Image (cartoon, grey):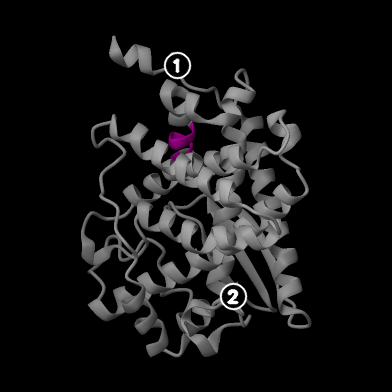
């Protein structure tokens, strides 16, 4: 009875047209990132291709191709897998009620928006591996996203370096993603969406609620063996959002954003409280602070600061 009260009956129906629209949104996200890449590199022009592939892989990846081309691949299985998080957010009554967008438009399926935001962040994450010089350090054949699945554990030094590169890509992706969100907030682009004026605080609260289930799904995909894990934990990624992404947001909005940032914190707190009721089904790890000192040391040991294609003025490796 308690479960029936918590959950709407049935799952959202998924048609071929639904998935086609999601793939189109991913392509749009990659085009947006491609435009930013062109501006960042100037005459050093690279082109990003996008493909949705059938693969035994689960996670997206970026490949370094010939003739100054990159390709971001999203496996078909990835969309089915992350849709579990979208289905949960739609069907769990307390979680759905906590999302301001669901309160503003209660009769709509907002999972398209969830997928759109998730894929925009992932596109930023993948291209950040390129901008930060990671693809020039490791050959594509060696760069295994989920880390030695089906093989032997990485030697400690290599695992630490790969983990540091994932943190590095997450930091840059957070900056790019929240800079986009900040520009939209500054232009009040979200007001019509929510049907309210100055709804940026609601947006920031919703972002924390929207991304925690995704990050948990990604975290659960990795091996439980700590010696094979290379991606940050779900909470680790949300800490990176808060430390680096929100600062980029602040720069774009050009106004007092304390309420906006407080909204993100309130949304994160609410998301954690709501997920605890699942008794470990989705919440399987405790929050952990990023080990910036070890990660920075690993990246500096291979002179990663010299391999960056774009010299970020606020590069955390310089601090």
Q: Looking at the image, is 181 positioned above or below residue 88?
A: below
| Residue found 60% across the figure and 27% down from its top | 15
According to the picture, the residue beneath numbered tag 1 turns out to be 10
Q: Nearer the viewer, residue 59 or 262?
A: 262
**Front tag of 1 and 2:** 2
Residue 291 appears left or right of 305: left
Estimate the x, y position of residue 132 in percent, counting from the top left. 54, 77
- Secondary structure of residue under mark 2: helix
According to the picture, the residue beneath numbered tag 2 turns out to be 131
Number of numbered tags placed on the structure image: 2
Residue 40 appears left or right of 62: right
**Residue 309's quadrant in the figure?**
bottom right
| Residue found 57% across the figure and 41% down from its top | 115
Magenta-drawn stretch, dominant element (helix, strand or loop): helix
**Residue 8's quadrant in the figure?**
top left
Estimate the x, y position of residue 51 in percent, counting from the top left. 62, 55
Residue 202 belongs to the span the image colors magenta: no
Estimate the x, y position of residue 212 in percent, counting from the top left. 43, 44
Residues shaded magenta: 81-86
Q: Which quadrant would the N terminus be assigned to in this image?
A: top left
Label 1 packing within 10 angstroms: few (<14), some (14-19), many (20+):
few
Q: What is the C-alpha distance between the residues marked 1 and 2?
A: 43 Å
Q: Looking at the image, is 13 positioned above or below residue 37?
A: above
Earlier residue among tags 1 and 2: 1
């Amino acid at each position: 009875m308690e479960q029936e009260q918590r959950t709407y009956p049935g799952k959202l129906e998924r048609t071929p047209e639904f998935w086609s629209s999601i793939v189109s949104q991913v392509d749009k996200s990659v085009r947006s990132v491609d435009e930013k890449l062109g501006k960042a590199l100037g005459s050093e022009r690279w082109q990003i291709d996008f493909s949705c592939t059938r693969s035994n892989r689960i996670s997206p990846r970026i490949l370094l191709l010939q003739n100054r081309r990159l390709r971001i691949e999203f496996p078909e299985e990835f969309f089915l897998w992350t849709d579990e998080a979208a289905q949960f957010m739609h069907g769990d009554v307390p979680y759905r009620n906590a999302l301001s967008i669901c309160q503003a438009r209660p009769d709509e399926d907002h999972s398209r928006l969830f997928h759109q935001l998730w894929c925009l962040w992932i596109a930023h994450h993948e291209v950040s591996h390129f901008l930060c010089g990671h693809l020039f350090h490791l050959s594509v054949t060696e760069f295994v996203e989920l880390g030695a699945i089906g093989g032997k554990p990485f030697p400690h030094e290599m695992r630490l370096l790969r983990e540091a590169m994932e943190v590095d890509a997450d930091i840059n992706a957070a900056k790019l993603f929240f800079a986009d969100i900040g520009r939209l907030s500054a232009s009040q682009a979200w007001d019509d969406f929510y049907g309210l004026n100055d709804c940026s605080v609601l947006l920031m609260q919703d972002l924390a609620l929207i991304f925690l289930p995704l990050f948990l799904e990604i975290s659960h995909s990795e091996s439980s063996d700590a010696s094979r894990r290379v991606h940050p934990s779900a909470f680790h990624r949300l800490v990176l959002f808060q430390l680096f992404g929100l600062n980029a947001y602040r720069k774009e909005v050009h106004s007092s954003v304390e309420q906006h940032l407080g909204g993100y914190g309130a949304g994160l707190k609410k998301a954690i409280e709501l997920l605890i009721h699942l008794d470990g089904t989705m919440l399987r790890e405790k929050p952990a602070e990023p080990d910036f000192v070890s990660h920075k040391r690993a990246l500096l040991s291979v002179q990663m600061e010299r391999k960056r294609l774009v010299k970020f003025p606020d590069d955390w490796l310089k601090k």
